[in-house]
Image: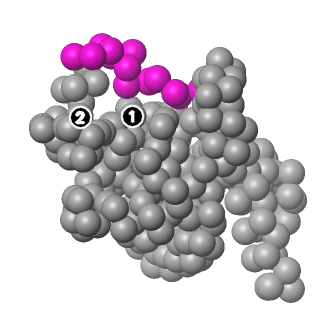
Amino acid sequence: MVSSLRSIAASEGLKSLWRGMPVVMCWAGPAHAAYFTAYEISKSKTASIFGANNPAGHLMSGAVASLVHDSWMTPIDAVKQRLQKAGSQYRSGRHACTVMLREEGIRAFYRSYGTQICMNVPQQMVHFTIYEWMKRKLNPDNTYRPSVHVVSGAVAGGAAAYITTPFDVCKTLLNTQPTLSEGNSKAIRGLANSCSVIYSTAGVRGFFKGSVPRMLTIMPSTAICWWVYEMFKYYLHE
């Protein structure tokens, strides 16, 4: 990971490490609002079926939250990854959207949607279930304790990230494959096709390339996300 950071910084500059962030920031707020709203509504509904704090309810609610979130974020993720690609031809998020739409059509924004769902639904099911379990273990009286939310969020996010890394590798391949303008005559389509390409190129280990950076990226973000969410939830209820 360190060598990759050095290589990117040396060849493209330090600013390239944050390329694509403005695009994500524009949509992250609304997407996360929809994400947590869907989770809370689903959790309330499933509690009447399975009972409160039942893992089955948390699994189902995590799946619902992921489906709602991904309907917002899949196109934005495709644009972000095009911007982050080494030697990217795109000058900005708007330029990337324009070129992708003109050369590849609307399908370019949703090429990885099936893989995204296959990755994120299990990831969020694991994430929410582990988070709720850890929160109960570390804080049985269910009082507002920021440290518990931070630790529970980090562990849940890291575990879910590692388990679903193979899907993320497939998604990244689908989103960053060479475009028609770059001379690619045979597009990689779908989860099965991307799995075949990865396995033939790098074997089983190829599916877990980038797992450590992925965990290190997701763990602090989920820790902060849960801390902020639980803080607002606590103060709004007071």
Q: Quadrant of residue 192?
A: top left
Going by the picture, which residue comes out furthest to the left? 186
SS of the residue under disc 2:
helix
Q: Is residue 173 left or right of residue 219?
A: left
Reading the image, the residue beneath label 1 is: 169
Amino acid type shown at disc 2: Ser
Which residue is tagged 2? 194
Where does the magenta region start and end?
Answer: 200-212
Q: Residue 178's x, y, as percent?
A: 29, 39
Where 162 falls versus 124 (above or below)?
above
**Which residue type does callout 1 highlight?**
Val
Query: Along the line of sight, which residue is nearer the eye, 105 or 95?
Result: 95
- Can residue 60 be seen here? no
Q: Tell which circle, 2 or 1, labels the residue nearer the N-terminal end.
A: 1
Q: Residue at point 40% right, 55% down?
A: 78
Residue 63 placement, left or right of 17: left
Say which quadrant the C terminus sits in.
Answer: bottom right
Mark yes or no: residue 148 visible: yes
The answer to whether residue 124 is above or below residue 44 is above
